[in-house]
Image (cartoon, helix red, strand yellow):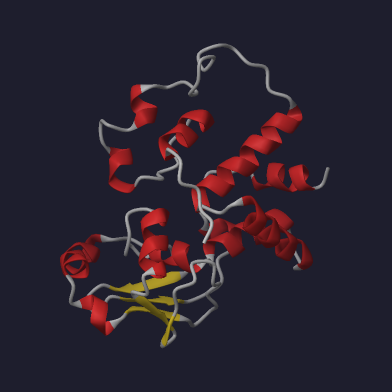
């Protein structure tokens, strides 16, 4: 499975804001954005004039980085969003939110989407009763996400169970912390998604 393996803190610094790609570290004093509030590289502290195309590209790259999706997969999600009725940008965010790895993250089973992706790839979860290890699988309304019995007894999920009672989840999900399960109650719409992005810039980028 292709994935980005470079330093993710550089991505946040390039965007100039926290994308919360490293979980708990992003909330502490070691966060690179807190320590160096300028883009990486030799000319990071110089002034740069950004074109309209540059703004569109930067926003597209930001959305990709937040959800941990490489260009080919991201383009496929965009094309699917275009085919659906409604606003393409809102459709795109809804599709990205419905990715299995993102749902695992949103339910609080992982502190970052990259960790959620790893847990999914290792086969720790079932989706509506079926073992699923495909991070890009899209959940549907009524789907149930469950930690598999073989995994629920390991040290990671044992410690997590006590912490999850304090977790808050989006309104389109329901979490049962005691049973380590979650349920999709509805398809997320733009109002349900708190990701701070301008999806219209992404649409404009691909519409050039």
Q: Measured along the vertical axis of the image, is residue 23 above or below residue 163? A: above
Relative to 25, is 70 on the left or the right?
A: right
Relative to 134, is 146 on the left or the right?
A: left
Q: Position of residue 197 (x, y in %)?
A: 58, 44
Q: Residue furthest bottom?
A: 129
Relative to 200, is 146 on the left or the right?
A: left
Q: Measured along the vertical axis of the image, is residue 162 above or below residue 66? A: below
Asked where in the image residue 128 lies, by quadrant, the reply is: bottom left
Q: Position of residue 77 (x, y in %)?
A: 66, 61
Residue 71 or residue 140, whichever sits in front: 71
- Number of on-image labels: 0
Q: Position of residue 207 (x, y in %)?
A: 81, 47
Residue shown at the point (69%, 61%) measured from the top left: 76
Q: Position of residue 195 (x, y in %)?
A: 51, 49
Residue 105 can be seen, yes or no: no
Asked where in the image residue 170 lies, by quadrant, the reply is: bottom left
Q: Residue furthest top?
A: 46
Residue shown at the point (32%, 54%) measured from the top left: 111
Residue shown at the point (38%, 22%) measured from the top left: 36
Residue shown at the point (42%, 55%) measured from the top left: 113
Residue 125 can be seen, yes or no: yes
Q: Residue furthest right?
A: 208
Relative to 125, is 165 on the left or the right?
A: left
Q: Identify the image quadrant of the C terminus.
A: top right
């Amino acid at each position: 499975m292709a994935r980005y393996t470079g330093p993710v803190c550089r991505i946040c610094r390039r965007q100039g804001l926290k994308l919360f790609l490293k979980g708990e570290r992003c909330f502490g004093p070691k966060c690179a954005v807190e320590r160096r509030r300028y883009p990486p590289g030799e000319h990071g502290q110089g002034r740069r004039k950004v074109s309209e195309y540059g703004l569109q590209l930067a926003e597209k790259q930001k959305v990709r980085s937040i959800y941990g999706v490489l260009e080919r997969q991201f383009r496929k999600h965009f094309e699917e969003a275009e085919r659906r009725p409604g606003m393409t940008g809102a459709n795109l965010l809804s599709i990205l939110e419905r990715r299995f790895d993102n749902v695992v993250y949103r339910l609080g089973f992982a502190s970052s989407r990259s960790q959620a992706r790893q847990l999914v790839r290792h086969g720790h979860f079932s989706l509506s009763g079926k073992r699923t290890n495909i991070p890009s699988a899209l959940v549907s309304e009524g789907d149930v996400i469950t930690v598999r019995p073989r995994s629920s007894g390991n040290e990671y999920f044992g410690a997590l169970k006590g912490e999850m009672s304090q977790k808050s989840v989006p309104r389109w999900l329901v979490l049962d912390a005691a049973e380590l399960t979650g349920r999709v109650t509805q398809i997320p719409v733009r109002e349900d998604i708190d990701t701070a992005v301008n999806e219209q810039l992404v649409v404009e980028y691909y519409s050039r």
